[in-house]
Amino acid sequence: MISKRQVRLSKCSVSTEEKQAVARVLDNAYLGMGKEVQAFELELKNYLNTESEVICVNTGTAALHLAIECLDLPLGSEVLVPSVTYVASFQAITASGLVPVACDINSETYFIDLQDAGQRLTSKTKAIMPVHYGSFSGSMPAVYEFAKNHGLRVVEDAAQAFGCSRDHKKVGSVGDVICISFDGIKNITCGEGGCVITGDKKLAQRIKDARLLGVEKDTEKRYSGQRSWVFDVQHQGYRYHMSDIMASIGRAQLLKIDSFSDKRKSLVQIYLKELSGLKSLSLLKYDYENIVPHIFVVKITNGSRDKAVDNLSQHGIATGMHYYPNHLLSKFKTSYSLPRAELALEQMLTLPLHVDLSAEDVLYVCETLKAYLD
Ligand SMILES: *Cc1c(COP(=O)(O)O)cnc(C)c1O
C-alpha cells in the first residue's frame, strides 16, 4: 500500500534568498575561501555573542577532526565519548590517532553518562567528547566539572545544537572547544559545512592553518585577497576550509534562524502535547525551552519499535534511528557491553521534524502512531 500523504523525516529549508546569495558569489567568480567565509565567521561570532573565535570548515565531521587533532594530545590518548552518536564523532577521534572510549548514556536524556565515563578513566584519558544529542546540552555543566576534576580537554559535539541556549547564553559561546554542523538538514545549513568555536587562541590558529593544508597564516592572506606563495608548514593539514559558495548559503540561513527556531519549537510542542502520558511511549526529559530541536526522538517501550516503523512507513511517514551504537560496529567494537545504549537501540524512534513540516503533518504523525500503539 502506498499512502497518498508523504511526510519526510528531515529536510533543508531554502528559498530565493539562498539562490540569490549563491548567484552573487557565482557572479563574482571567486568561489573558494574568501570574503564570504570571513563575513560568515564574523556574523556567527556576533550571533553567538562570544569572544571566542569561529573557524568555518567544510563539514561538521571536519570540525570535530581538526578540533581533536589540533589539541596535540599524545598519540594513543583516550577520548571518552558516548556510544550513541553519529559515527562522525568516533571517526574524528581515530583519524587523529587517538582512541575513542565508548561510554554508556543516560536513559532519560541519551546524553553521556558521567558515572559510566568515570569508570573508564585511565592514565591515558586526555579528553571527553560529549554529544548534544537531540540538541540537548543541559548536562554540560556537569561535564565541565568532571573534566576539571580529571584534567581533560572538552570537545563538544554540538553538531545538532546551533541556536540553542544554556544559562541565557548561546550554546558555543562559552566552553573549551565546540563543533557545529551546517549539513543539509541541520538547524541551519551551508549545503554542507561546519565550524569550530574556541577561545583558546593558540588552538584557533592551529585549526585555521590546518584547514588549509597547514599553510601558516593562509587564512589571513586569503581574507586580505592575497595568496600564499612563500610559506612554512609545521603540522599535518587538510583541505577542510569552507568555500564562499557555502558561506553565502549559511549567511542567508543565519538571517532566518529565529523563525526556524520558532517553527521547530512549535512543532515539538505539538509532539509533546499529543504524545505525553502514553503507556508504551516515553519522551526524553529535556528543557525544551532552551532547545532548537534538530531531531525529535521518542522511546517505544513495549518492544514493538520495528513494527511501529513499518506501520508509520505504510502511512507515508518516514522515521529514523539516532543512532546505532558505535560500540557495536566492527571498527569500534568493545569487550564490554553498554546496557543503556543497547536498550536505546531497541526503543529509539526519530519522528519527522523540519521547518517545512506543518502542524497538520505532526498531528497526522501523532494520530497514526497513537492508533498503532492502541
Ligand atoms: C551531523 C552530525 C555530525 C557531523 O556533521 P556533518 O556536517 O554531517 O559532517 C556529527 N555529530 C553529530 C551528533 C551530528 O548530528
Image: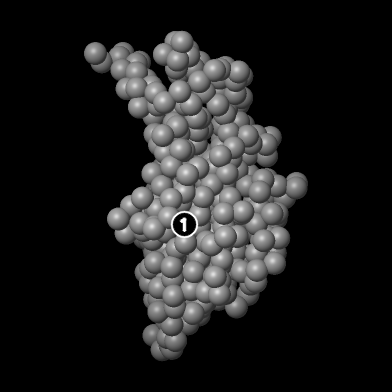
Q: Is any atom of residue 196 visible in this view?
A: no
What residue is at 57 percent from the left and 60 percent from the top? 119
Q: Amino acid at mark 1?
A: Ala
Q: Is any atom of residue 81 visible in this view?
A: yes
- Residue 352: name its quadrant: top left
- Residue 304: name its quadrant: top left
Q: How many marks?
A: 1
For the view shown, which residue lies furthest in the right direction? 168
Question: In terms of depth relative to the viewer, which is nearer, 27 or 129?
Answer: 129
Quarter of the picture holding the N terminus = top left
The answer to whether residue 319 is above or below residue 112 is above
What residue is at 46 percent from the left and 38 percent from the top? 344
- Residue 165: name its quadrant: top right
Instruction: Please provide percent x and percent y for residue 80.
Output: 52, 61
Which residue, given by chain and number where applicable, does mark 1 sit on?
A: 102
Instruction: Please provide percent x and percent y for residue 207.
Output: 51, 72
The answer to whether residue 162 is above or below residue 75 is above
For the view shown, which residue lies furthest in the left direction? 1
Q: From the viewer's perspective, is 7 left or right of 149?
A: left
Instruction: Please provide percent x and percent y for residue 126.
Output: 56, 71
Question: In terms of depth relative to the viewer, which is nearer, 2 or 182?
Answer: 2
